Image: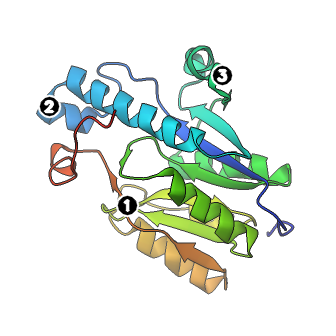
């Protein structure tokens, strides 16, 4: 089912996030660098993501923690910076993304959804996506170097890309593109970025703490 087309970039930017608790975030990375350092890396990436999105004017900004119990922590730390906070639903990644995007499309807003553990993305990436959505693009993907994607944006309902996907596989981006092509979707692709799950993801990334 496809929703009504958006005619402007009345856009919400959603960031999926976790509270940076030691031993609870970046557990694969922690096996190599230790739980405390892994949580520090994640917190740095989260802060940088929030800072980059905060540079963009005329978009609604929403932080969505993965755990409902952490909603208050995010509100206490980020509401004063202009961020709304609401928790993700319980479900697999596809279900959580679909419901998050569905909510904004129901408000007649296009939506950009990004992760909080990516190296190298900039505010200008989001601005490019806004321009594409405002000029008729239905879906935008930002591929990750591990074969997934770090950004998905929509102005129309193409929820099939979230359903029945094996998210841990290295062909998620490829399969997503195949599905969009079968539906004759007008889509665009951003430059690939590196998300951080393992120690080797930091190698060659220019990691300097990203203050």
Name the residue carrying label 3. 79
Q: Secondary structure at mark 1?
A: loop
Q: Which mark is residue 144?
A: 1
Q: Residues within 10 Å of mark 1 (few under 14, many from 20)?
A: many
Q: Which mark is residue 29?
A: none
Which sits in the foreground, 80 or 156? 80
**Image x and y of residue 68, in percent:** 60, 23
* Callouts 3 and 2 close, C-beta under 8 Å: no
As drawn, 183 above or below 141: below
Q: Mark 3 or 2, which is nearer the eye?
A: 3
Quadrant for the N terminus in the image:
bottom right
- In this orientation, does residue 194 appear? yes
Q: Which residue is depicted at the point 62% across and 46% down?
A: 56
Which sits in the foreground, 95 or 200? 200
**Rounded to the nearest whole Å, what is the CA distance between mark 1 and mark 2?**
22 Å
Name the side, left or right, on which 102 lies relative to 24: right
**Rounded to the nearest whole Å, what is the CA distance between mark 3 and mark 1?**
29 Å
Name the residue carrying label 2. 33
Mark nearer the N terminus (3 vs 2) = 2
- In this orientation, does residue 158 appear? no
Which sits in the foreground, 44 or 164? 44
Q: Secondary structure at mark 2?
A: helix
**Rounded to the nearest whole Å, what is the CA distance between mark 3 and mark 2?**
32 Å
């Amino acid at each position: 089912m496809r929703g009504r087309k958006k005619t402007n970039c009345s856009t919400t930017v959603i960031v999926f996030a976790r509270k940076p608790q030691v031993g609870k975030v970046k557990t694969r990375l922690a096996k190599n660098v230790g739980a405390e350092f892994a949580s520090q890396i994640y917190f740095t990436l989260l802060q940088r993501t929030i800072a980059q999105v905060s540079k963009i004017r005329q978009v609604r900004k929403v932080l969505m923690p993965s755990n409902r119990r952490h909603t208050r922590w995010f509100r206490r730390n980020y509401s004063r910076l202009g961020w709304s906070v609401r928790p993700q639903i319980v479900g697999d990644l596809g279900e959580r993304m679909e419901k998050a995007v569905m909510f904004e499309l129901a408000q007649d807003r296009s939506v950009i959804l990004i992760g909080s553990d990516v190296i190298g993305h900039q505010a200008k990436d989001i601005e490019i996506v806004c321009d594409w959505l405002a000029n008729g693009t239905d879906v935008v993907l930002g591929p990750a170097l591990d074969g997934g994607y770090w950004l998905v944006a929509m102005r129309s309902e193409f929820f099939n890309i979230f359903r029945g996907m094996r998210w841990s596989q290295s062909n998620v981006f490829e399969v997503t593109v195949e599905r969009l092509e079968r539906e004759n979707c007008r889509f665009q692709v951003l430059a690939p970025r590196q998300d951080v799950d393992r120690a080797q993801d930091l190698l060659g990334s220019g990691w300097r703490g990203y203050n």
